[in-house]
Image (cartoon, grey):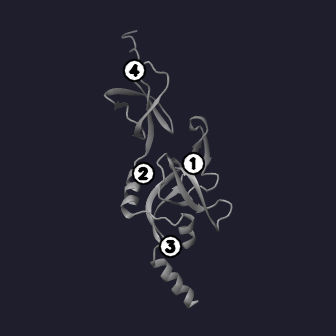
């Protein structure tokens, strides 16, 4: 028993690397316009602790390792959308099994802190519709809730619609509602 305690104490003090840690959101939106709400994700329960591998691309998806909903003993590595995660923080990896599940990679302290600071502000994809075009183009990321006006490439756009995933902006100002008649 003493050997196990020493071994555990030694393993706990020696970190194998740094990692960004997050939790699965209690409710995740799926389907057309994000109208289908689910508890957690298919592979991970709501609130499950996930370790994020250093990103290989920045398209809104991240590789994560965590304990699977069906088998809580082993680590599962899959790719999930960043928007399904919350409570980002920096943590140390102490488990060799977890380190292997993350591909043996670690974050640098600066990268991890920068990523956590960026994820601290909720963001939506902003899309603009230019005059004469029938479709929206990607513009930038905006805060959630989105601002009423967006300046992009020298043009002021006005918020037309937003949902859980994106904000649509139009060059047309919002309609003005007529005021009620006076004394009528």
> For the residues carrying marks 3 and 1, which lies nearer the camera in this image?
3
Q: Quadrant of the N terminus?
A: bottom right
Q: Are marks 2 and 1 in contact (CB under 8 Å)?
A: no
Are there few (<14), some (14-19), or many (20+) residues within 10 Å of tag 2?
some
Are there few (<14), some (14-19), or many (20+) residues within 10 Å of tag 3?
some
Residue that label 2 marks: 119
Are there few (<14), some (14-19), or many (20+) residues within 10 Å of tag 1?
some
Q: CA distance from mark 3 to mark 1?
A: 29 Å
Provide the secondary structure element on which disc 4 rests: loop
Q: CA distance from mark 4 to mark 1?
A: 34 Å
**Horizontal relation, residue 33 to residue 54: left or right:** right
Residue that label 3 marks: 94
> For the residues carrying marks 2 and 3, which lies nearer the camera in this image?
3
Residue that label 1 marks: 27
Q: CA distance from mark 2 to mark 3?
A: 24 Å
Could you tell which of marks 2 and 3 lies nearer the N-terminus?
3
Residue that label 4 marks: 172
Provide the secondary structure element on which disc 2 rests: helix
Q: Position of residue 49 (x, y in %)?
A: 54, 61
Q: Quadrant of the C terminus?
A: top left
């Amino acid at each position: 028993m003493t050997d196990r305690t020493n071994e555990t104490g030694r393993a706990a003090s020696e970190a194998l690397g740094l990692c960004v840690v997050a939790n699965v959101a209690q409710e995740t939106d799926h389907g057309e316009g994000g109208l289908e709400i689910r508890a957690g994700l298919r592979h991970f329960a709501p609130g499950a602790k996930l370790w994020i591998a250093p990103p290989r691309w920045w398209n809104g998806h991240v590789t994560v390792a965590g304990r699977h909903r069906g088998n809580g003993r082993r680590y599962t590595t899959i790719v999930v959308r960043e928007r399904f995660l919350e409570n980002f923080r920096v943590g140390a990896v102490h488990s060799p099994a977890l380190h292997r599940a993350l591909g043996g990679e670690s974050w640098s302290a600066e990268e991890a802190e920068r990523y956590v600071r960026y994820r601290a502000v909720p963001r939506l994809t902003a899309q603009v519709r230019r005059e004469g075009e029938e479709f929206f183009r990607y513009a930038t990321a905006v805060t959630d809730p989105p601002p009423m006006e967006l300046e992009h490439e020298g043009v002021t756009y006005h918020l037309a619609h937003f949902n859980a995933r994106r904000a649509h902006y139009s060059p047309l100002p919002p309609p003005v509602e007529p005021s009620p008649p006076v004394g009528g």
